[in-house]
Image: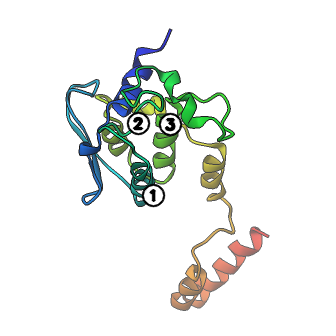
Amino acid sequence: MINPEYWDATREALQLEWKNVNFEQGIITLTDDTTKSKKTRHIPMNDEAKQILTDWGKNRTRGNLVFPSPRTGKRMNKINSWLPFIRGTGIENFRFHDLRHTFASKLVMRGVPLYDVKELLGHAKLEETERYAHLSPEHLKKHVQKLNKKQTQPGALEKLLKNATEEQRQMIAAILMEGK
């Protein structure tokens, strides 16, 4: 059985039409008749997404659907309809919904506020978004490394010493010696 939450997100992509992709403004519009929330959302595209969709659109043979069935040209209605698109990519155990988790996680790890990620995903509550944003161990390790004694801003020590009194310089030297 397909989780309905997964299907709703997939349906948004399967129903996407070229008329709702505005390359000039860099925005994809998901209309109220295609979203789970029944609210229209405007999703900005980054340069890479615009380029990928531009290239994808060049191969379009007919119709207004962005992701038509490769066999019929009509709207796909099953999640496993995506399998032809991922064959040969080397991706194993693909689940379409993983893309939403990856999207949310990468945004959060790049410092995007969770509220903004919530808006981009179209979630009604912040708690829903929290389930999507998974921080990688490497990302968390980078933050823990900030606690290292020797990690300082470039030039920070020089600036501090320049304005310090002789007594302050001796205290700074003593602190630095403790850390070695």
Secondary structure, mark 3, is helix
Residue 83 at least partly seen: yes
| Amino acid residing under circle 3 | Leu
Where in the figure is residue 145, as x and y percent of width and height? 66, 57
Where in the figure is residue 5, as x and y percent of width and height? 40, 20
Nearer to us of marks 3 and 1 is: 1
Q: Earlier in the sequence, mark 1 or mark 2?
A: 1
Between residues 122 and 114, which one lies in front from this camera angle? 122
Q: Which mark is residue 93?
A: none
Is the residue marked by circle 1 packed among few (<14), some (14-19), or many (20+) residues within 10 Å?
few
Q: Which mark is residue 67?
A: 2
Between residues 37 and 170, which one lies in front from this camera angle? 37
Secondary structure, mark 2, is loop
User: Residue 146, relative to residue 62: is it above or below?
Assistant: below
In the image: residue 118, left or right of residue 136: left
* Residue plotted at (36% across, 23% down): 8
Residue located beneath label 1 in the image: 48
Q: Earlier in the sequence, mark 3 or mark 1?
A: 1
Is the residue marked by circle 3 packed among few (<14), some (14-19), or many (20+) residues within 10 Å?
few
Where in the figure is residue 142, as x and y percent of width and height? 63, 55
* Quarter assignment of residue 78: top left
Is the residue marked by circle 2 packed among few (<14), some (14-19), or many (20+) residues within 10 Å?
many
